[in-house]
Amino acid sequence: MVTVNRLRELLLKSEDSQNRGEVADQFNANPNEFVLLLDEVFQKNSTKFAHCKKLVLNLVDLLSDKLAIEVITRALDDSNSKIQVKGLQATYRRQIDSLNEQISRLLTNSDEEFEVRKWAVHILGGTDPINYGRFLRKTMKNRDDDVNLRKEAIFALTHNTSDETVGALCTLLGDSNVEIRRSAAWALAKVSSEDSISCFLAALEDTDEEVRDWSIRGLRDMDSSRALQGLADAMARSVPKEQEQLIRLVVEKKSEIILRAIVELLESPVVSVRRLAAWAMGVSPYSPAAGSLERILDDEDPQTREYAKKALERLGHVDPSEFGLNL
């Protein structure tokens, strides 16, 4: 019979990674003795076996599910945050959900280290986003909590596309912290729910360019005429800098709603907007734009004229040799 002392010797032998498979096999074959070894190694308030804890956690992926849970349960309850994190990482790798109640307590404990709470967020979001969605939404909305943890909760909630999650993310587009608004806009773009269209349209007026950028992308990537019409309307009423941002991000959508809006900007009084609109017509040729493009062939801006010529050539309206173009 293998004794606890023998398992302890084997554990130290596992420091050489080549021996880990053999050692894990012995632990799996002697589960009762291994549990006694764990009780010894993970003694409360003891640092005597700190190195042994790490060795055990290095083996956790080779253990049976039952023994892996025995190891991880003790690691999560350890006083050393690095041991807790290794236990959480093992939980994440093995997609164990039976420890979620214990893990949720780590998340709600504001005294825990950030890395511990971060991994707790991602385990709950990855293994049971429905039942722990409220938990995560509460974390991401808590303005008194660590901004970085709130951002991690937002990321984790992209696994859950419920109405409650979309609504909570929309609310965060009005958060006072720009990092939270950026993360919420990114998450909504990833979730891509038509329920977020109104939120995105409102966020197009955000003072932060990155928030606007993700809002544009979110609307652009939806298969929704309402979303695209919202972008077209925004393009018409925005200030020149924002019009340019919109053109760059939506031109390759090749939607008639969008291209029609870009054509209207060929007559903008702002040179940089006309120039970019002419460029866009070359990227996504649009036959109804021919007349507007011909009108700017004598534009005051040389680059605008050049873009207009190239766009018309792509439409078959211009002989490139007439303009000395080498295409």
Image: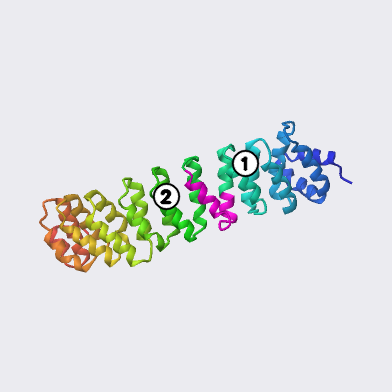
Instruction: Give the labeled residue for mark 2.
Output: 172
Q: Quadrant of residue 59?
A: top right
**Three-letter code, disc 1:** Val
Q: Which SS does the magenta portion mostly show? A: helix
| 252 up-or-down from 103: above or below | below
Question: How far from the left and from the top, in percent, is residue 246?
Answer: 28, 54
Q: Earlier in the sequence, mark 1 or mark 2?
A: 1
**Residue 131 left/right relative to 192:** right
Indicate the secondary structure of the residue bearing disc 1: helix
Q: Residues within 10 Å of mark 1 (few under 14, many from 20)?
A: many
Question: How far from the left and from the top, in percent, is residue 94?
Answer: 65, 52
Indicate the colouring scheme. rainbow
- Count of picture labels: 2
**What residue span does the magenta drawing correspond to?**
122-142
Which of 163 and 57 lies nearest the eye of the viewer?
Answer: 163
How far is the residue under mark 1 from the one under mark 2?
A: 29 Å
Which residue lies at the image location 40% right of the left edge and 47% below the top edge?
A: 181
Q: Which mark is residue 211?
A: none
Which residue lies at the image location 23% right of the left edge and 66% below the top edge?
A: 286
| Labels 1 and 2 touching (C-beta < 8 A) | no
Indicate the secondary structure of the residue bearing disc 2: helix
Instruction: Give the labeled residue for mark 1.
Output: 85
Q: Residues within 10 Å of mark 2 (few under 14, many from 20)?
A: many
Which mark is nearer the camera, 1 or 2? 2
In magenta stretch: residue 127 = yes
Question: How far from the left and from the top, in percent, is residue 169?
Answer: 44, 53
